[in-house]
Image (spheres, rainbow, N blue to C red):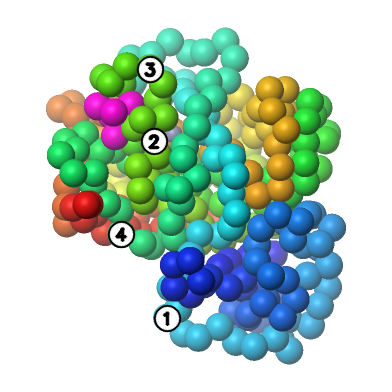
């Protein structure tokens, strides 16, 4: 199943792609794509309903982030060996976890706002996992069972804030609009092998990142199980699993986003995002 949210920011409604490809409104069946509604059993039940009998979603409706009510937005650093190398960082012995502020989450095609004064805002295409049932100290099997689905995440990053302002990376990772999620929350049965997906990112039509989830240092299930050793993961939490090489920081000379740029990114089977870069407040 491909699920999504649509409508104005803060007033999105849940939707689903029907078998004929049409987009249908789910708000008669669930309140939103959040919390208990993300339980894998409940999502499975949605797929059993007559989707073509549901109201159609208006053409051209804005897409919101594909999950609501995110309480923990966890990111993984240096999870592709070639990206760690371009960043000049050693490969970690255990997954590097850091936080993105949940308030940075926006729709997949919303404007990307450069923080005022920012000179080093960078791009990172990533595969994100959405948790559908609570998990604490999960093993690989319970980690798999806890997953509601997958989506594209743009882990937008301000490198000065991240690396030159002391302390944790979170300073450069949670600015408003730094977390586009979507277009779709894709349930696991649609993804034959989550470690066999292509990732790509273009800036102004020029290919910057090309990657494959088979190159992850720590695999998706391992990351979910690992994170759950340190906290209770809850339905609606998002874990974004690291970026492949090709970020602006790793280029010679480095290249960063500026107002007017268009960033497009996607993952096979999960859809694509497109953002216009604008000067933020
Ligand atoms: Zn990242």
Question: What number is the disc on residue 279?
Answer: none
Mark positioned earlier in the residue sequence (3 or 4):
4
Tell me: 6 left or right of 179: right
Circle 1 packing at 10 Å, graded few (<14), some (14-19), many (20+), is: few
Q: Tell me where the magenta segment starts and ends, as one range.
A: 158-162
Q: Quadrant of ligand 1?
A: top left
Tell me: 256 left or right of 81: left
Question: What number is the disc on residue 60?
Answer: 1
Circle 2 packing at 10 Å, graded few (<14), some (14-19), many (20+), is: many
Q: Residue at x 19, y 38 (%)?
A: 118
Q: CA distance from mark 2 to mark 3?
A: 13 Å
Q: Secondary structure at mark 2?
A: loop
Q: Is residue 253 visible?
A: yes
Does the beta carbon of the residue at mark 2 sit less than 8 Å from ligand 1? yes
Q: Secondary structure at mark 1?
A: loop
Measured as percent of width and height from the top left, residue 148 is found at 71, 51
Q: CA distance from mark 2 to mark 4?
A: 16 Å
Mark positioned earlier in the residue sequence (4 or 1):
1
């Amino acid at each position: 199943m491909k699920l999504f949210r649509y409508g104005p920011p803060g007033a999105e409604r849940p939707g689903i792609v029907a078998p004929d490809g049409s987009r249908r409104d789910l708000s008669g069946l669930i309140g939103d794509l959040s919390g208990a509604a993300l339980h894998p059993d409940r999502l499975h039940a949605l797929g059993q309903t007559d989707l073509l009998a549901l109201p159609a979603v208006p053409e051209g409706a804005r897409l919101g982030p594909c999950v609501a009510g995110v309480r923990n937005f966890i990111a993984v650093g240096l999870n592709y060996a070639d990206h760690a190398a371009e960043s000049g960082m050693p490969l970690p012995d255990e997954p590097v976890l850091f936080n993105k502020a949940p308030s940075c989450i926006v729709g997949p095609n919303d404007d990307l706002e450069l923080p005022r004064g920012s000179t080093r805002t960078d791009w990172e295409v990533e595969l994100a996992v959405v948790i559908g049932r609570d998990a604490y100290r999960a093993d690989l099997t319970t980690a798999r069972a806890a997953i509601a689905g997958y989506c594209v995440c743009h882990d937008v990053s301000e490198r000065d804030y991240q690396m030159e302002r002391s302390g944790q990376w979170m300073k450069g990772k949670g600015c408003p609009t730094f977390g586009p999620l979507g277009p779709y929350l894709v349930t696991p049965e649609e993804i034959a092998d989550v470690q066999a997906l292509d990732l790509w990112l273009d800036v102004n039509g020029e290919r910057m990142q090309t990657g494959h989830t088979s190159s992850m240092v720590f695999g998706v299930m391992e990351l979910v199980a690992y994170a759950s050793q340190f906290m209770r993961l809850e339905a609606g939490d998002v874990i974004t699993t690291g970026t492949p090489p090709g970020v602006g920081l790793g280029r010679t000379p480095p290249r960063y986003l500026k107002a007017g740029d268009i960033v497009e990114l996607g993952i096979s089977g999960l859809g694509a995002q497109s953002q216009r870069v604008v000067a933020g407040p």
